[in-house]
Amino acid sequence: MIVEIVAEVIHGRKIGRALGYPTANMSLEGYEDVERGVYRSEVDIDGTCYRAMSNVGIRPSVGGKELLLETHVIGYSGDLYGRRLSVRLVEKIRDEKRFASIGDLKEQLMRDYDSIIHSH
């Protein structure tokens, strides 16, 4: 079942950018019942549908506490702050988990990204 989340892009801590996967961060207010985890997703921006990698959760590996949707839009490099986006969570890839190190998190993000790039 595809879940669609519509929310405004807010400023985050820029951790995704530091890990090589910049994300559009959105509050999940009103969407608290969405299952936490990493998803293959899609985002429409200015009439173009982009593939994306999204995380629904609190980001336990980086000390996060607030429930957020973080979406890395593949192939998009513009500024999305303050824009309302519609993110469709198409397929859950894995559960959210706490990693022992940032290096372990980065390795898992690379595997997640590869699985999305090679999916149809």
Image (cartoon, rainbow, N blue to C red):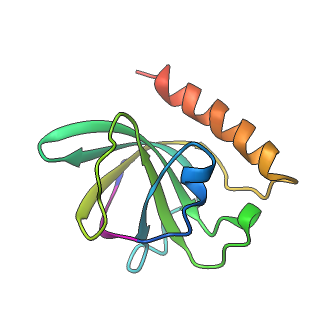
Is residue 8 magenta-colored? yes
Q: Position of residue 88 (x, y in %)?
A: 33, 50
Query: Can you see residue 51?
Result: yes
Give the overall secondary structure of the magenta segment: strand
Q: Residue at x 49, y 71 (%)?
A: 33
For this rendering, which residue is in front, 86 or 19?
Answer: 19
Is 7 placed left or right of 71 in the picture? left
Figure check: 45 above or below 24: above
* Quarter assignment of residue 97: bottom right
Q: Percent from the top left, x then y, of residue 120?
A: 40, 21
Q: Where does the magenta region start and end?
A: 4-10
Q: Is residue 100 left or right of residue 59?
A: right
* Residue 67 coordinates in the image, percent (x, y): 55, 74
Q: Nearer the viewer, residue 103 or 65?
A: 103
Identify the residue at horizontal 64%, vertical 40% (top origin). 109
Residue furthest to the left in view is 47
Q: Is residue 73 left or right of residue 94?
A: left
Image height check: is 64 above or below 2? below
